[in-house]
Each structure stands twice: as C-alpha cells, then as structure tokens.
Amino acid sequence: MIYVAAALALLVAMTLAVVRALLGPTVFDRVLAGNAIGVLAILLLCVFGFLTERPEFLDIGITYGLLNLIGTLAVLKFWKYGDLAHDDAAQQDRGVS
Amino acid sequence: MVEMVSWISALLVGAGSVIVVIGALGLVRMPDVFTRMHASGMIETMGATLMLSGMALTAGWSLVTLKLLVLWALFIFTGPVAGHALARAALYAGVRPYLRDKEQIARVPQRYGLMPPPGDER
C-alpha cells in the first residue's frame, strides 16, 4: 500500500527535520526546521486521512497550514523586534524607530 | 481505466515521498541557512504538489479534491512569504551566505546587520 510507504517517508523526513532543529546553529535554522516540520505534518495528516479513509483529516490539515504561516512569521517578528505588537511605520512617524 | 488511474496516483504519491525525503536530507546536509532554505523549498513545492495531486487522483471529482486544492494553494502562496521573511530576518541579523571567497562576503553592505566574527558560525 503506497500510503503506508508515504507515511513512513514523511516520518523519516520529520525525524531529519527535528535533527536540524536540534543541531541548528542559529535560530533561523530552527525556525526553518519548524516550518518544514509543519508542512510535513500537514502532508502526514492528508496521507493518514487517505490511509484510514476518513477525509475529515484534510480540514485539520488546512487549519494547521494557516497556523503554520502565522507561527513562523510571529517567531521571526519576535526575534527581530522583541515585541509581537511592534509597528514599524508608527515608530517611524514618531521619529523613534 | 480505473486501474490505470490508481497506478498513476500511487506513482505520484511515491514520487512525492521520495522528493520529501530528499528535501529533508538536504535540510540536514546543507552548510548554511540560505542553502537549507533551498532544500526546504523542495518539500513544500515539489513534494507537496506531487503528493496532493496523487491523492486528488484517488479522490476523483469531489469535495475532497477541492480541499486538497485549497491546501495546495495555501502551500504555494504562504511558502514564498515565509521563505522571504526568513531570509530577510537572517540577513539583517548578520548571518552571511556561505561563500568560498571571503572578500565577497565582506562586500555585503554593512546595513544588513553586523558582520559575524570570522571563523565561528556554521
């Protein structure tokens, strides 16, 4: 069954991404690995849905995909400004920057 | 005909799995953030496209295919956004591309963050 093989391949790939997240010298390597793990998890959800013939898992996958982007951008913004509510344009208007 | 479609579907899902594993291997093996982003891009474009199209062939014309299409569009539109933000954040934080020619690294404008001390990193 091809979906079992695909699920195993995705699990192997996730393990490798976790290795990169643990090794990663900079925080950006870890963010990249986290993003890749999110994408792989979505694919794994889809494959699992087809494996068990329960396509409801696709809805969970879509939700996960939306959260993944927000999470990645939030971590990057936090790393740059140290504040999730930072507004670059408003700071420049006030001449603070 | 139905047999044929299921074979093609299995082929696409298998090819997607291979691409995904190759991308993850690249994520571990590549030397710095920017090259690793290249490998990670494999996962979310080629790997995801192949796997989702294979699953769409299995599902046929139904709501499931529409959901797979939405998921694919999500990958295609959010992947570049996240990648661009990541590369920009890394460059401004002072991470430099891995180049053999050290003088070329020195030519990266100083406004992109501070130069890392030579020799450490990666």
Image: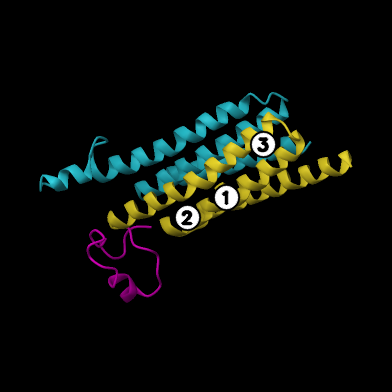
Q: Which residues are magenta?
A: B95-122
Chain letter for yellow?
A: B
Q: Residues within 10 Å of mark 1 (few under 14, many from 20)?
A: some
Residue A51: give x, y in percent of width and height. 72, 29
The residue pinned by badge 3 equals A7
Mark on residue A22? none
Q: Foreground mark, 3 or 1? A: 1
Which residue appears at 67% of the width and 49% of the height?
Answer: B18
Q: Secondary structure at mark 2?
A: helix
From the viewer's perspective, is B13 left or right of A59? right
Q: Is residue B41 placed above or below A59 in the rendered structure?
A: below
Disc 3 residue type?
Answer: Ala
Q: CA distance from mark 2 to mark 1?
A: 14 Å
Does the magenta-highlighted stretch encompass residue B116?
yes
Label 3 resides on the chain identified as: A
Residue B82: give x, y in percent of width and height. 42, 46
Disc 1 residue type?
Answer: Thr
Does the magenta-highlighted stretch encompass residue A14?
no
The residue pinned by badge 1 equals B45
- Along the line of sight, the residue nearer the viewer: B121 or A64: A64
Chain letter for cyan?
A: A
Residue A90: give x, y in percent of width and height. 18, 42
